[in-house]
Image (cartoon, rainbow, N blue to C red):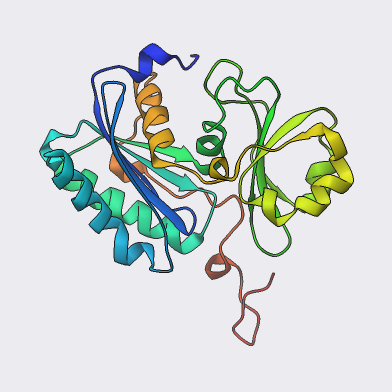
Amino acid sequence: MALTTTSANNGLTILALDSSSMTGSVALWRDGVLLAESLLNLRTTHSERLLVQVEQLLAATGLALVDLDLLGVVHGPGSFTGLRVGLATAKGLATAADLPVVGLSTLEVLAMNLPFAPYPVCAFLDARKQEVYSCLYDCSSGFPVAVGTETVQPPRQLLNNLADEVVLVGDGVPLYHGLIDEILAGRAKLPPAVAHQPRAAAAAVLAAVKFDTGLALPVSKLKPCYIRPSDADLPKSRGGSAVV
């Protein structure tokens, strides 16, 4: 089912969380209106600040957990530690308030920063180890529709496979700007820097429309989407380090 603006105005009060990168954010959304958003790009960890951000936004808007109808959380890909903190926080809040949960792709949330883009949107994020997470979206309807699968690959391989004009969004853009210029030349469309960060406000909109299409989960089903295994999950060498 297609995502629609009508679905986003469905009367729900939604709390959305994103801790997939250093820039963590929390948003409150009600019936098609963004009530509040907190976005912090700080050196403090998500475990130190995420729950505090939630408490501050609820207090600022005069809401409590019992007033919420839905919780949206970005489940990856991204920082393994950040995702674990975000999902643990979401599970705790959803359990306490008996809320349904919608898990959201970091790449999809990034693409939501570019509604009605006239070109395909390639969301791509630094995956470390000289690789990037990526997915291609059609955002012409106002909402991102994936036209491929989420992948992890070297940035040169990704960019060589982008044959036509494309909008690039995500923290991979500033990191690999020189490579983008080398391979895509004038075919790459680069939005302002503010678009390269996933936003909890965008996650809240997507959570609303996904809930309307029956994609909410019980909290017990919520899992991170790493795309590739974390180092902690890789087999160990005899010396005790992960084999990569």
Between residues 91 and 197, which one lies in front from this camera angle?
197
Q: Residue furthest front?
A: 192
Q: Quadrant of residue 100?
A: top left
Residue 47 falls left or right of residue 66: right
Q: Quadrant of residue 30?
A: top left
Residue at the spot 58% in from the left edge and 19% down from the top edge:
116
The number of numbered discs placed on residues in the rendered structure image is 0
Q: Position of residue 230 (x, y in %)?
A: 56, 63
Residue at the spot 62% in from the left edge and 75% down from the top edge:
242
Residue 243 falls left or right of residue 25: right
Residue at the spot 56% in from the left edge and 15% down from the top edge:
141
Quadrant showing the C terminus: bottom right
- Say if 192 sits above or below 115 in the image: below
Q: Position of residue 6 (x, y in %)?
A: 37, 12
Q: Position of residue 203 (x, y in %)?
A: 41, 36
Q: Quadrant of residue 170?
A: top right
Q: Residue furthest bottom?
A: 239
Residue 168 falls left or right of residue 103: right
Between residues 181 and 241, which one lies in front from this camera angle?
181
- Say if 34 sits above or below 84 in the image: above
